[in-house]
Image: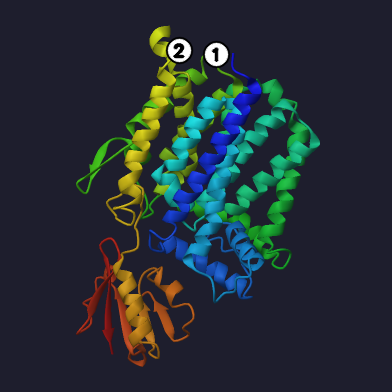
Amino acid sequence: MADPAHSRRLFVLLAGLLLAGAGLLRFAQIDRRLLHADEAVQAYQTWQLLRGDGYTYDPDDKHGPFLYYAAAGLAKISGQTPATLTVAKFRTVTLLAGLGTLALLLSAAPRLGRTATLIGTTLLAIAPLAVIYDTYFVQEAWFSFFTWALFFATLRLIDRPTLPTALIVGIIAGLMQATKETSVLHFTALSGALLIVRPWREIGRLVPRLLIAFLAASVVYVIFYSAFFTHSAGLTDGLRAYFNYAQRAAGSPHDQPWFYYGAILWPHTQGGIHWGEPLLLLGALGGAILAFSPQANPTHRALAAFTATLLLIYSLIPYKTPWLLLTPYAGLALLAGLGAAHSARWLPEKIGRFTPAFFGLALVLTGAWRAGPALGRYANDSRSPYLYQPTSPDLTRLVTTLETQALDKKIAVISPDHAWPLPWYLRDRATVGYFTTPPQNLTAYDMVLLDSRLNLPPPAAATAFGLRPDILLWSAPR
């Protein structure tokens, strides 16, 4: 019989090695992809905050304030200035969230089982989707971390409804909302999952503690959306954002069919390259079935119900991007680990004793095999299903040209969306104007950058530079 203390030490050792390996893999990836348009928007706002311009929440087209304050705070602690900020330093902020999520899931081993947790967390550690968006300066890595922190904190509150736990639940929920307004979708999925796996009477007895959690979340909301008590209008703007997002729930250029997320993981060919993670889906299905068997515990059932509900909600909403899959992907990885760890239940004893190790190893090896091209040759390639409208490597050539040949020129950027991430690279230049249509005083500018989406004839003697897939910037002197 295995020594429990020895088993714990072995688990801690393996967990430490896993976190170290995941950290090295993510650090190696931190500069593999060019700055995405969405990353540039977040970086620009953080840069403004750090240089003393303050922060004002925009309910029309921005997410919550947490990421900006977290990045600016870490920059100040580490002695960074607006002039020394780099893309790698921004991405380190979200990398911390990704490693935090892995550590959080590993800490759930007493609830999920050590073998299942190790296999599932390993799958997440090497998953291209997780590696990529843990090194993207967007909200999703922190949003995923807070979501899973809330999941396990809420389960603890149900088991032990103490005041400190209620406060922790409320603070985490407040930070989730301060990260992304779409936290309401995760709250809905979590509530639905808990009602599936817990009797109504157990939830009902938590009402006093949930009220305390709500008050704690409200305090966090006030702190962040008021810009630390300097902008009271942000409190109503934070609520008004929900009406804006509801109106834009459909009809966006980012609308995708309901099966979009399943298609990312299902075997398919994109741009002549084979993709897909069928073994992960198979393992997750097995884990979900086992979660509702008599041998499973309430945490297993809550995990399966939460993951399935979250996937259903995101599939029904027309607006879709690959990074929105990050949180439910962590659930799929844990369910696959659960399926692998208990795969022997469906087989004869002589064969079944080797099945968990075999299936777990197969999951990890196939995951690593799929990660190779996604994180290597196709790390910044639109043929990768994990990427979404990546910035063209050709933009580097344009930025170099502007830095070497147009330092003293006035530039007019004519683009439907300001040609992000270009404004980040031109952030220190006061002689740049941004327009959605050609301005009347265009002759006042020395150089024009014209977005091909406007369907206007390129200027004479123009040079084409790639911006994003199928989008060009025509550059021409005046």
- Relative to residue 261, is residue 50 depicted above or below? below
Question: Relative to 348, is 270 on the left or the right?
Answer: left
Which quarter of the rendered picture does the N terminus lie within?
Answer: top right
Badge 1 element: loop
In front: 394, or 323? 394
Q: Closer to the N terminus: mark 2 or mark 1?
A: 1
Q: Residue at x 65, y 62 (%)?
A: 234
In front: 56, or 114? 114
Q: Residue 171: image x %, image y %?
A: 70, 46
Q: For the residue marked with disc 2, what is the amino acid?
A: Arg
- Relative to residue 398, is residue 116 depicted above or below? above
- Relative to residue 393, is residue 8 depicted above or below? above
Badge 2 element: helix
Q: Which mark is residue 245?
A: none
Instruction: Give the residue pinned by disc 1.
Output: 295
Q: How is the image coloured?
A: rainbow
Instruction: Give the residue pinned by disc 2.
Output: 345
